[in-house]
Image (cartoon, rainbow, N blue to C red):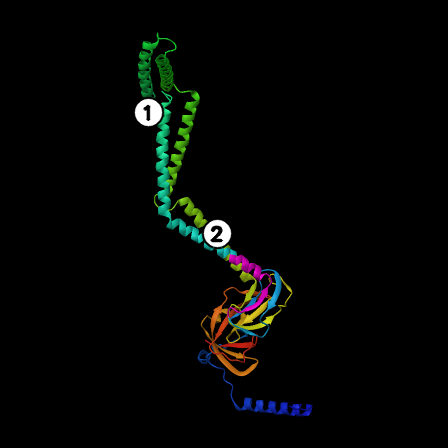
Amino acid sequence: MKHLSGISLILISGFAVLALSACQTGTAQTPPSQGAISNVEVPTTRNSLIIEGEAVPVNHVTLSFPVTGVVEEVTRIEGENVEKGDVIALLKGTEKQKAAVSAAQAELTSARHALDDLVNNANVARAEVQLRMAKAKKDLDKAIENRNYKNYKRADQWLIDQAQADYILALSEFNNAETVWSNWRDKDDTDKNRAFALQNFAAARKKVEQAEASYNYLMGSPEEVDVLIAEGELVVAKANYEKAEEEWELVKNGPNQNDLLLAQERLDNATAQLDAAQAALKDLDLEAPFSGTIVTSNLKVGQISSVGSSSVVLADLSTFQVESSDLTELNINRIEEEDSVNVTFDGIPGLSIPGTVQRINPLGQDNQGDITYSMVIKLKEQDPRIKWRLTASLEFPEK
């Protein structure tokens, strides 16, 4: 518009004053009554609320290796689309870690078989323990009997009985030989029959003396060393039997409980070792947690990637929402979750998308002295022209 000159402004002002004066002289001014004032309606309509936000992918994440290592290969670059589970990059050491996984799998298989064998062979193990317990009981009974004999005699009763029988037989032979010898004793020394009688008598006497000595020895009190040996044998036999009883208690109702516990602990440890080896192997791969586009990536082959230093930004650019941190404490109570909102974008003229308030953070943030609240808007429609961080205007209709 062109600027008016000073004279024009003066003329216009003059005409305005004359017109106002004419109106005032032509109409009587009457003050409004009290009743008229009370009938005046004060407008109560509240304007719609407009808040600024920005477009953000519903699914987006910043990825980095959880361990420090050297980047061996970058399989996906910035701008590429990936599917869930695709490997984006790898660190060195994969083959070594695969070997550790194989070793852990072998140990797990061995531990599982050991546990299965322990359970499946429980009946055989129970029978073996039962047999050992029976033998141990037999040995204990024999040791007790042997020790009791040592209280009175040097040998078992059957040995004493045998020695007594040997002595009786030897004594009978000696008596017979002595009778024959008495008949030939006065004969000529060169007599052949006398020599045979003397020979038989001497042999019979030696035999009866030996049998008598053996019998008397067995009937006598045992030597101290024999008692000690018998006591030692009894202690060993008793210990073996008690051990067999303990083993029986462990297996009489199933597998040996101690062995079962150890086998289960071995299996649990093998499982944990395999999980750890697999996790360590997985840490060397940077995988896509969902399908999307690699928006940014600073990974390079050969670089040292420390925890959190190298990163890849992955996003699903097909589905957006609007996020805003522009809701002040003056307006927080004007908006509720599930409220409707109209969303427009500065960079897409003419595009208007309906949405709803999906979430309002109940914790406000101090923004340079102002308390603001963040919220997320779910869009009911999508448009391929929407880009990440595109400025959006959120218009909430008046209530």
- Please identify the quadrant where the N terminus is shown: bottom right
Image position, residue 354 (x, y; %): 47, 78
Query: Horizontal and vertical percent for residue 385?
Result: 54, 80
Q: Is residue 261 left or right of residue 330?
A: left
Distance Cα–Cα, label 1 vs label 2: 60 Å
In magenta segment, residue 96: yes
Q: Which residues are magenta?
A: 84-102
Is 327 one of the magenta-colored residues?
Answer: no
- Type of amino acid under label 1: Trp
In the rendered image of this protein, does residue 40 appear above or below residue 99? below
Tag of residue 269:
2
x, y percentage for residue 214? Answer: 38, 19
- The secondary structure type at the circle numbered 1 is helix
Residue 368's spot in the image, x, y percent? 60, 66
What's under tag 2, amino acid-wise? Asn
- Precedes in sequence: disc 1 or disc 2: 1
